[in-house]
Each structure stands twice: as C-alpha cells, then as structure tokens.
Image (cartoon, helix red, strand yellow):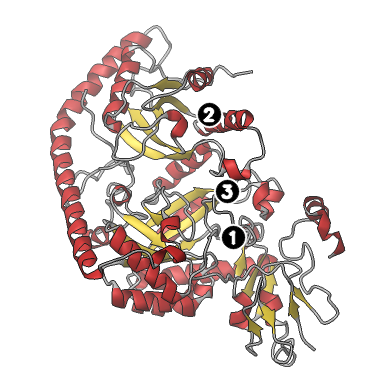
Amino acid sequence: MDLPVLSNTASAALSGGGCSSGGCGTAPDALSHLPDPVRARVRDHPCYSEEAHHYFARMHVAVAPACNIQCNYCNRKYDCANESRPGVVSELLSPDQAIKKALAVAATIPQMTVLGIAGPGDPLANPERTFETFRQLSAKAPDIKLCVSTNGLNLPQYADEIARHNIDHVTITINCLDPEIGARIYPWIFWENRRIRGVEAAAILIEQQQKGLEMLTTRGVLVKVNSVLIPGVNDTHLQEVSRVVKAKGAFLHNVMPLIAEAEHGTYYGIMAQRSSTAVELQTLQDACAGDMAMMRHCRQCRADAVGMLGEDRGAEFALDKLDALNIDYDSAMRRRKEVREAIIEQLASQREAKVKIAETTNKREMRWSLAADAEQTAQVSAMPMPQTQTALRPVLMAVATTGHKLINQHFGHAREFLVYEASSAGVRFIGHRKAGLYCSGSEQCNDDDNASSAESTLEGTIAALSGCEVVLCSKIGYEPWKRLEQAGIQPNGEHAMEDIEAAVLSVYGEMMAAGKLANTAPTAVKAA
Amino acid sequence: MALSITDSCVNCWACVDVCPNQAVYQDAPGFAIDADKCTECMGEFAEAQCAAICPIECAIMDELGVPLNPLGSLSGIPLEKLLALHPHLEMA
C-alpha cells in the first residue's frame, strides 16, 4: 500500500520550492505558504521547524530572572530539578556564565544551532542581562541563531534593539485579545512604575503585545505566537487570536496545553482549573490550522533546557562542570560547520526523494483510494449510508519512539507518545502526548508506594491517549496490554524497529482489511 | 525610614533593577535592602518600586514589619485556601 505522507496544510505542499511534506508533520509542510527566504531561516531551527527538531538542538540560558507581569499559570517560588516546564530553572546565570556555557554546549553538541533566552522571568524585563548575553554570543559564536521569548509588555520599547542584535526569531505569548478575558489570566502587571491590576492591566498588556508584534514583523523579525489553552477562559477565543496574529504577520501559532497542578502552587493549580484534554487541544489546533500554520511539536521546555527538543542535557553543563570540560574551540567550530552542512544536505536530499515519491504515488493513491472505497462500500452496503465519496474513517495511532523515526521504545519507558492520523489520504503527524504523571522525578517527589504510583502512571497514560485506537511500541507488558485493550486502544508490538509512517500505514491497511473502518470509531470498554 | 526583604525572597532581581536608589543588594538567602539608602521611594514614585514589582507576597516589609503585599494580595488566591495549604502562614 502506498500512501503519501500528508502535510498539515493539506494542499499546496508538493509544488514549487523543492520543499514538500516531510518528517512527522508541521514543517516544512505547515510552513509551505511562507516565502523561500523565510523557510530558509527556520530550516535549522528546532523550535520552529518540525523537520529540524529531529536533527538540530537548542539551548536556553537562564539569564532573565525578573518578570513584569503575573500569569495565573506561573509560580516563581517553585523550582524542582525534576520539573520540565516553562518558568523553571535550576541555576541562574550571569551573561558571562551564559556565554561560557553556550560555548561549551556548542562544542559538545555540534548540532546545537539556536540559543534562546526565555526566562525564567521575562527577557525584556531584564534588558541589560539579555542584550549583553546576545551581544557577547554574536561576537564569539556568530553561527548560532538567537531567539527570545517574551510576554510582550516591553516589546515596543525594545523592538529596535531586537532587530539591531540580529535576533531574527521572537516568540510572544498571547493568550487573548479581550481585556475581560485577560483579567482572568493576568492578575497584575508592573507598568510605568506602578502595579496595575485587573482589566486595566490586561488592556495595557494586550495593546503592547499587538503593537510589539506589528513592530517586529515590519522590521523583518520572524514572530511565533504562543498561546496557553485554558478551558473555560480562552478556549473559544483562541481561534480569533490565531486569525488576528496571522493578519499581523506572525508566521506560526503554537497553542499549548495549560499545566496546572496544585503542587506547583499556581493560582490555576490551587483553584483546580482543569487542563485541556489532548482531544480538545487537537480540535482547537485543527480549527486554527485553516487560518494559520500551527506548531504541534512543542515540548514546553524549561528556561534552561539543553539539547534536542524533548530531551534536557542541562545537568551535564552545570556551571561547576564547565571547567572540567577541556575544549578546543577552533576545531569545535569547524566541526559545527561540517555537521550543520551535512544535516542540511541530508534534509534537502530527503525532501527531493519525497517529492519524487509523492509524484509517483499521486496516481497510485487515487487508484488505491478508489479501490478502498469500493471495498468499504461493499462492506457497509447494508447500512443506510450515503454512497458519495466514502473516505475511510481516519484513525489516530500513538507511537513510542526515542527518535530516528522508528518504533523503538518499550511502552513502559515512553515518557511521551507521538500521535499520527492515518486516513485514506495518508499519514500526518498530529502532536505528542505526555505519558502518565506530569512530574518525571517520582522516586524523589512521590510519597506513594511504587505499585500505586505505577498504577496512576498507567491510568494517566491511558487518559492521555484518549482518542487513539492503536499504540505502536517495541514491546509492552501484559498488564498494560490488558488495560489498554479494555480502554479501547489496541497495543501493537509487531512493528518494532520499523519506520513509523510505514508501520502506521500498514496497520491502517490491516484495519481496513478487517473491516474496522466503518464510519464510527468503536466505543471503549470502560474498565471498572 | 526603610523597607526590608524577608527570607521568602526568591532572588528574581526584579527589585534590584527598579530601585531608584540602588539600595537593594545580593545577600543570602535572598536580597536585602540597605536601610541607609532606602527612601521608600518617597517623593520619587507613588509606590515603593520594589514592592510594586515583587511577585512574592509578604516578602517586602515596612519598618513596623507589616507586609506591603499581604497574603493573597498578588495571586488572588483566597486566604482560606492559602492557609489550608500553608498553616504556618497564619502568623504572617
């Protein structure tokens, strides 16, 4: 069975620019509407290009502790080394220390192409520390791209300085356009030497964010917008946010799930504000995708994360370990250049190969699809269904993987699952879902005995996989197998070490052959 | 007449950057205020700048030991919830 790998923005991807669908989803396909020069600027940026995040690494340096607003999902008091979420760091750095760390990481991880400043406070509430870090880094390691992530309050004031420092990627967190909604997200801001609260504060913040967004895009700075999906607060409003920020020139929108646990001590955590379900998040991302390129591979990393997205090697580069690293910077910089060029070349040839495959499969796909229609129609002909264009029912499948686009992870070891959608049109990456408990440091943080802890992890994982009908992994134990089946999710270990997309298609083909693709998904057998 | 910082300081530097008198200095476990330099921003700003940006409730005190940002005043979390979570705060 040959099916093309689909882009997130269904059409347009295959023509022109030599850039077609690829990787597991968002880019370059979702970015295919962008002009070539913009795509070239994000092709080695793991946080913007979904394709790049398989090959390139990023680091955040925590030089910006101060913040000028309060968000209801943030608590500045909480700092646990096992936590991985924005706003959390283990070690605050001075600009000099940040440069030392950045150079050590650049030499040790040659595929590190991006250095960002994202906190733990707001970078633009720490302008001296932030811009001093950028100034030194662009002098000492000019091949590293610079980016900054901000709440936007001080953005208009620093837009020119951002452009001057050659920071060509900025992320603004924009959760709303309506001050009434904003007042339920931001209790206060520090503005013109006063603490301002409520709707008045939200109105100022929103105005500055929008003004800052426009100023950056007119200066040629690439802007991504982050939004936190807060059910009951801004969930129905975010499509409007998506539409407006796109109109103002943002090139990518990243809607993220709220992280709210009582033990984090945040307002939302303590007030038991619920987070979005994976299905709600995906539904909103799909709804926004009509207006805007959506990012689906964000891992919501710490403000001092180091390495590939989804991994954090920060502990290897703690300040007290830096002196022990013996680094020959000149040869390291040469090596960086070689590694980077090799990856870009590899990506280009992969893209070319995919375009060729897509061209040849376009015809085959049509035949396959027609044949499938006929088969499906035959199977369901007894049912009162419209006979027009019966596309096969799409199926979500979760995959346990450590990378390399292979199904190569034991179910129980997976800390996150990649979710793919198979349909008669092909396979597309949908997003990732965190396994089980949010905090990864159960041996330190969890007082429960191990059995009940494992139990609640499995419960959490099954909940996180809701909507998926299949989970593909290299191996899986008997108990989780049984529990997944009860929840209506079919575990599958038959495709260990196989290519993810090929395996998803193969399983989809088996489901079709078994007549499982009638129009409604089977309902889960609820475990007692 | 001077403000002071309690041990609940989280070292976020925000007050250092906004103090018009450079009265805030790094100390352990948190930042501290030089009483000789602090003017409580009288005559300069309507609000003491450190207290206007500090994100931590009860971290900045006046001369009488009264917090400028009392419990619940910044987060909006109802007092009863905070006290239930942190019974030792009853005294604050």
Q: Would you name the residue on which mark 3 appears?
A: A259
Label 1 element class: loop
- Asked whether residue A139 is in view, the answer is yes
| Viewer can see residue A389 | no
The residue shown at (64%, 57%) is A72
**Dot 2: chain letter:** A
Tell me the residue that label 2 is attached to.
A462
Asked if both marks, 3 and 2, belong to the same chain, the answer given is yes
| Observer-nearest of B6 and A266 | B6
Q: Is residue A210 found left or right of A193 in the rendered image?
A: left
| Marked residue nearer the N-terminal end (3 or 1) | 1
Callouts 2 and 1 on one subunit:
yes
Asked whether the beta carbons under mark 3 and mark 2 sit within 8 Å of each other, the answer is no
Amino acid type shown at disc 2? Ile
Left or right of residue B29, residue A492 in this image = left
Instruction: Please name the residue that numbered disc 1 is placed on.
Output: A178
Compute the Cα span from label 3 to label 2: 18 Å
The total of numbered circles placed on residues is 3
- Chain letter of mark 3 equals A
Q: Where is residue A78 in the image (x, y as percent from the top left)?
A: 63, 57
User: Closest to the observer: A183 or A507?
Assistant: A507
Q: Quadrant of residue A95?
A: bottom left
Circle 3 sits in a helix, a strand or a loop, which is it? loop
